[in-house]
Amino acid sequence: MPPLPSELAYVPFVSVEHMMALVHHIGIETVLIDLAAEIEADFKRWDLFDKTPRVASHSDVGVIELMPTSDGEMYGFKYVNGHPKNTKEGLQTVTAFGLLAEVNSGYPKLLSEMTVLTALRTAATSAMVAKHLAPKGATTMAMIGNGAQSEFQCLAFKAICGIDTVRLFDVDSAATRKCARNLQGSGLTVVPCKTGEESMEGAQIITTCTADKQYATILTDNMIGEGVHINAIGGDCPGKTELHRDILLRSNIFVEYPEQTWVEGEIQQLEKDHPITEIWQVITGQTEGRRTDKEITLFDSVGFAIEDFSALRYISKAIVGTEFFTQLDMLADPDDPRDLFGMLQRSAS
């Protein structure tokens, strides 16, 4: 019999099946609220984190990225891809997994799927930011782009911002029908729309989440009235945007991490001296968010590693005392740390 690994050699692994079961166990809106609180708490200690733009490998068909960060006690990273062409091949546009490790020892403490978790944390971040920037009393959101992220976004804005109506539009009407079907029974009033302009009628919040890797114009300047909040989450790599440049020039723009957003966000269309505000400064009270009822606020969100760190840490706590993980024999742990070869030899007997 080969020697059994010690407890230190085991790493909790949360599979897709585990993640879905955990979300149903807790409740999806509760998970979104909890994630938003976790992310907001980490943004309030922004200065403690290592920060770097994600390490990206771009190709003609997509991007593969690593997103690392550390708060000095724990280290986390996410592997994530973005391949818009995958949908036509029956594959997910975005897939991901992540790891959380202890800085003191370097030992991994959690390995998790992050395809589902990324959708949850993206939605939680969007709604958390909108809580600071959107018009007070907003009840209606236009959801433009009704793909894999859309339902998560709608539920997050309902749970965190009090939205009660969503107006859906996608160039693919089948995607809109899918989103409307999935939101049945959610408590939201769901209005499928035939055009982007129609979806924005009466909307105080506009979320754009499309997938094509190109400079697109999902919103033109004449479509945007005063006083709205735009949650632009579809632009997430060089050469991919959703908003006409003139909208940016009229908006008060908020970003996660400028060094990354200048490369990947809507603001890649602007000169580098254009004024932007880092959202952590609003969350900590160092600067204002929405200043007037008439201004346009724009959250140019590309996703940032601290959000994934927060999500992984939340999951590591949420699985304690549950059955929603597997212990992986992932780390070699010989009795004598210097005798790794001896451990290998003895395993043959």
Image (cartoon, helix red, strand yellow):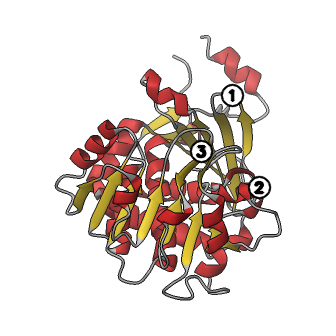
| Contact, mark 2 vs mark 3 (Cβ under 8 Å) | no
- Binning the other alpha carbons within 10 Å of mark 2 as few (below 14), some (14 to 19) or many (20 upward) gives some
State which mark lies toward you, 1 or 3.
1
Q: Which quadrant holds residue 138? A: bottom left
Q: Amino acid at mark 1?
A: Asp
> Which of the image's four quarters has the C terminus?
top right
Q: Which residue is at 46% across, 37% downward?
A: 327
Which is more N-terminal, label 2 or label 1? 2
Which is more N-terminal, label 3 or label 1? 1
Q: Position of residue 154 (x, y in %)?
A: 35, 59
What residue sits right under mark 1 in the picture? 60
Q: Which quadrant holds residue 333? A: top right
- Binning the other alpha carbons within 10 Å of mark 1 as few (below 14), some (14 to 19) or many (20 upward) gives few
- Could you say whether the residue bearing mark 2 is in a helix, strand or loop? loop
Tell me the number on the disc at residue 99: 3
Q: Which residue is at 42% across, 69% downward?
A: 205
Number of marks in picture: 3
| Residue at the limit of the structure toward the left, as seen here | 185
What residue sits right under mark 2 in the picture? 52
